[in-house]
Image (cartoon, rainbow, N blue to C red):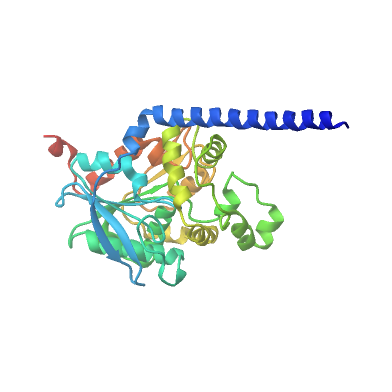
Amino acid sequence: MTQSSRHRLLWGSLAGGAGLIAGGAVLQRQFMHRIAADPERAVLSIPPDGRPLGITSPDGTVLHAEAFGPEDAATIVLGHGWTENLEFWTYQIRALSQRGLRVIAYDLRGHGDSDRAVGGDYSIERFGEDLEAVLAAVVPDGRRAVVAGHSLGAMAIAAWARDHEVERRAGAVALINTGLGDLIGEQLLVPVPGVAHALNKTVAGRAFLGSHAPLPRFSTPLIAALVRYVAFGPDATPAQIAFYERMLITSPPDVRASVGITLSEVELNDALPRLTVPTTVIAGARDRLTPPSHARRIAEKLPELEQLVIIPETGHMAPLERPTVVIEALEELAAKVGYDADAVAA
């Protein structure tokens, strides 16, 4: 190859690379424009302003919570899922507090503004003890709350129910997009080899949920597509996906991995008979992480099933994807503990 040929090849390669970079920049701008133009962005970009609460769990871990709405109203306590924070409930917090309910949302240990777990303890039992601490702090004596959890937050409710007197603090419960056992075996995201699942579920869990792999520090069209595939249904908007993606990106990798291992080992179906209050179960028909089979099994074992709701065209993020469905279900449960929507409206 002559020197002039090598020069032509070099410059051709550089020009091709520059073209790819320029094309990528155009795609990135278009991607960001779609998020900015999404009407949901305005709703999600300004989270409700709550009254901060500091709550200490029995092991000394300090949990961050926020209160919204009138202090003397019926109370709803909201616990988010893995790699989320209390802002996940933005739609529900805003709507329910405006309708006269007192809403308490808290960051699970290691998430949001809550402290990392004392001693690195992210066992499911600790998440249950955290919920007991929150309820003891925010539910007045003689009154009961609606307790709702998404994914890990719902597992925390089950862990709490297994070790505490449910009817003392809860008048109704909502379990949203969750499973209480065999999460690795039933997820539809990554096929786990049968031999790995049969011989060593812990190894499979560590590989799937317990990864410390770093996450990108900013969103791209490819990353957003992956997040949609993993966690959302087809109707989720660009701003909704970006909203959750920011939570995921800022979740500490070591906490993410430790909690992921806990999830891979969860077995809480034996707690369901202790949920002796009206309980609503909500699932997404297209949830790849906790498919509807989990919700149906939970519903079958509940002693006081209020309703089983499987939402069409919805993934793992029902409170974000279908906020109205979740809001209405929580309002109906609030009526069980003394909330009167008509009286508030009047």
Give the quarter of the image for residue 113.
bottom left
Residue at horizontal 43 percent and vertical 43 percent from the top? 244
Q: Nearer the viewer, residue 337 or 323?
A: 323
Query: Furthest residue to the left?
Result: 346
Query: Furthest residue to the right?
Result: 1
Total residue callouts? 0
Q: Position of residue 36 (x, y in %)?
A: 40, 30
Examine the rendered structure and indicate whether residue 197 appears above or below residue 227: below
Q: Nearer the viewer, residue 15 or 313?
A: 15
Q: Is residue 98 among the parts visible in the rendering?
A: yes
Residue at horizontal 52 percent and vertical 44 percent from the top? 291
Examine the rendered structure and indicate whether residue 330 appears above or below residue 271: above
Q: In the rendered view, does 56 fall on the left or right side of 265?
A: left
Quadrant of image for the N terminus = top right
Examine the rendered structure and indicate whether residue 312 appears above or below residue 93: above
Quadrant of image for the C terminus = top left
Q: In the rendered view, does 307 fall on the left or right side of 216?
A: left
Q: Is residue 306 among the parts visible in the rendering?
A: no
Q: In the rendered view, does 161 fall on the left or right side of 192?
A: left
Residue at horizontal 25 percent and vertical 64 percent from the top? 136
Give the quarter of the image for residue 45.
top left
Q: Position of residue 296 (x, y in %)?
A: 47, 45
Examine the rendered structure and indicate whether residue 16 appears above or below residue 265: above
Q: Position of residue 138 (x, y in %)?
A: 23, 59
Residue at horizontal 55 percent and vertical 36 percent from the top? 225
